[in-house]
Image (cartoon, helix red, strand yellow):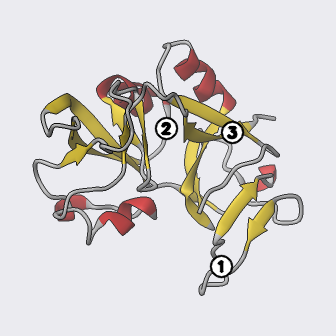
Amino acid sequence: MPSFSIFSTSNDPKHCLVDEVPESLKPKKWRISKGMPMEHRYPSDVVLKMDSGHKGLVVPDLVSNTERIAIISSKLKGLLDQHSGARIEFLPVSIANHKGRVAAKDYFIANVLDHVDCVDKEHSEVEELHPDSTLLSGLFRLQVLQDRIPPEAKMFRLKTMAPAILIRDDLRALLDAENLTGIRYIAMGEECAIY
């Protein structure tokens, strides 16, 4: 039986941090954090700025951010496009450094559109304060119900906690072999804090 991990960012102090999206994206960003298609709603020429209060300047393959979105390099995009089997909308972005100069082009927001309802609430640590009772307001340890995950699913969002993206072990191994930077995996049962 395959195993899954939460696809997350590393905390390398050398890596940059994006702490907000531009005004043109703010009213629509919620769609991305929920894994809803952007299609024609996505603005052109989106530039994400590095947090000036964070000293890191290196732009990794998976960029840390406070916006609950997956910001990825073209190398990681190519791998996910070819091997994930998931429906992913790749939305182009550039990343500007602390001085406002473009430090990285050919980056993308990976908007994973597949959702699976598979949280094992009995064995997970969750917070259920969301106004919609079908959604979680916090996730602190995750266990999944394997029988609810489609056999072909290698990457998907949790239906009840959309900012959490899960990755299957075989796709993880393929990414690990490529020496990608900025990625951290949170194992089932490991402590986390996703809101």
Residue under pointer 1? 134
Name which residue type carries label 1: Thr
Q: CA distance from mark 1 to mark 2?
A: 26 Å
Classify 175 as above or below 81. Answer: above
Image quarter (top left, top right, bottom left or bottom right) of the N terminus: top right
Question: Residue 186: which numbered mark, if any?
Answer: 3
Q: CA distance from mark 3 to mark 2?
A: 21 Å
Determine which quarter of the picture holds residue 128. Answer: bottom right
Front: mark 3 or 2: 3
Label 1 or label 3, whichever comes before in sequence order:
1
Q: Is 131 on the left or on the right of 88, as rendered?
A: right
Mark 2 Cα shell of 10 Å, populated few (<14), some (14-19), many (≥20): some
Q: Residue furthest right?
A: 122
Name which residue type carries label 2: Gly
What secondary structure is marked by label 1?
loop
Question: Residue 46: which numbered mark, if any?
Answer: none
Classify 32 as above or below 185. Answer: below
Name the one closer to the observer, 38 or 109: 109
Label 3 or label 2, whichever comes before in sequence order:
2
Mark 1 Cα shell of 10 Å, populated few (<14), some (14-19), many (≥20): few
Name the one closer to the observer, 140 or 143: 140
Q: Residue at x 17, y 62 (%)?
A: 40
Determine which quarter of the picture holds residue 132. Answer: bottom right
Question: Residue 85: which numbered mark, if any?
Answer: 2
